[in-house]
Amino acid sequence: MFLHLFRYQIISTFRDKASIFWRFAFPIILGTLMYAAFGGISENEMAFRAIPVAVVTDEANPTFESVLDEISSGDEPLLSVTECTRSEADELLKNGSAVGIISISADPSLTVAEQGLKPSILRAFLDEYRMSAKAIEEIAVSSPEKLPEAVEMLRNETEPVSEKHLTDGNNDPYVCYFYNVIAMSVLYSAFISLEIASRTKANMSPLGARCTASPVTNLTSSAVCLLAETLISFVGNVLALLYFMFVIKINFSVPFGYMLLMILAGVIAGLSIGYLIGSVFTFKKELKYSLMVGYIMLCCFLSGLMYQGMRQFVEEHCSFLNRINPAGFIADSFYALNIYGAGERFRNDILSLIVFSAAAIIISMIFTRRQSYADL
């Protein structure tokens, strides 16, 4: 009987075009649209490029000129230098083609049009040069014999601050949107479980009456159907994940095995949501679908699907919502694995998702067992 029900549930699902759309087409379409909206934004915002500057020579300064040549050459130059006249430099600064104007003289100066990171880098560069030049002058006056040693020390000086990666994960902030796309996709498994729950209600449809009158109990029938739908939803979301990874090249920076685990846990959570709504509420199926879609969309919004910083905002102002948000558990488990690895935060997210699913299924079964009808 188990295999018979399992087989026919799978056949029934693949004959339902709407079900196939939500399982297989929807996550791929949503991910593609998200990639079209955000693809490449992070690289454009975060990648460092040489700072364009206009250089005007008011007075020869061979030392400073050699320094400029050094930092504007190589594979990763700090500056992109344009040598020009004063009037040309003013025009470049005015139209935004140059961040600042460096005037070469005995005491080089800087002119910028606005504040920001790049102007601050230029100021720091000039300040560093002035301090080094002043130190050389003082040593040349007080201890000429030590001048070669001091020049060599400044030449070999290492930066006091070096770049250290706190994690080997993907630091691209926009990858979090794809974590939420997966969360939304797996939770939409609720569509079919709501339909399964409706079959246990004889007063909802003729199909429900026939299923209720059959020799197979509602709980047994529902359990087999939910297992079949878990398999189908899992396969559909894994295919979407492979599409994200190998077609549109999203670097999730999460071990594939863990991603499969999170997708499975998310699918079970989605099925439990639909089964709960279908079992507890007795109004028309269309209203149940509206309630379910509204709930899932609210969960995805609070987890950061529409605005990246929403989950943190909720944590600061109403942290309780993050403790009952299945979409938040899924998206945050991806983030935790990416940044921190399989540590306490990841385990808490998975445990919270399991507890949420178990509670929803238990409540659904309680309501399902309480059903009785005077006649069918």
Image (cartoon, grey):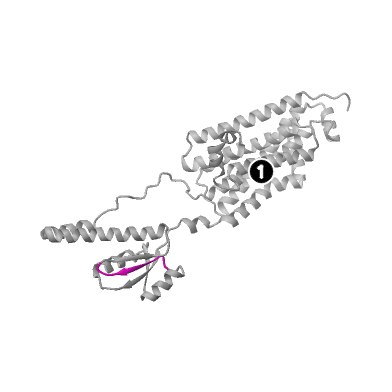
- Tell me the quarter of the image containing the C terminus: top right
Residue at x 50%, y 40% (from the top left corner): 336
Q: Is residue 126 above or below residue 359?
A: below
Q: Is residue 180 visible?
A: yes
The front one of 99 and 222 is 99
In which quarter of the view is residue 50 placed? bottom left
Q: Does the magenta-highlighted stretch encompass residue 105?
A: yes
Residue identified by numbered label 1: 297
Left or right, 243 with reference to 124: right
Left or right, 269 with reference to 131: right
Q: Position of residue 127 (x, y in %)?
A: 29, 59
Question: Looking at the picture, which amino acid does disc 1 mark?
Answer: Met
Determine the residue located farthest toward the right in the rendered image.
Answer: 375
Range covered by the magenta-colored residues = 98-106
In which quarter of the view is residue 125 placed? bottom left
Q: Position of residue 341 (x, y in %)?
A: 47, 39
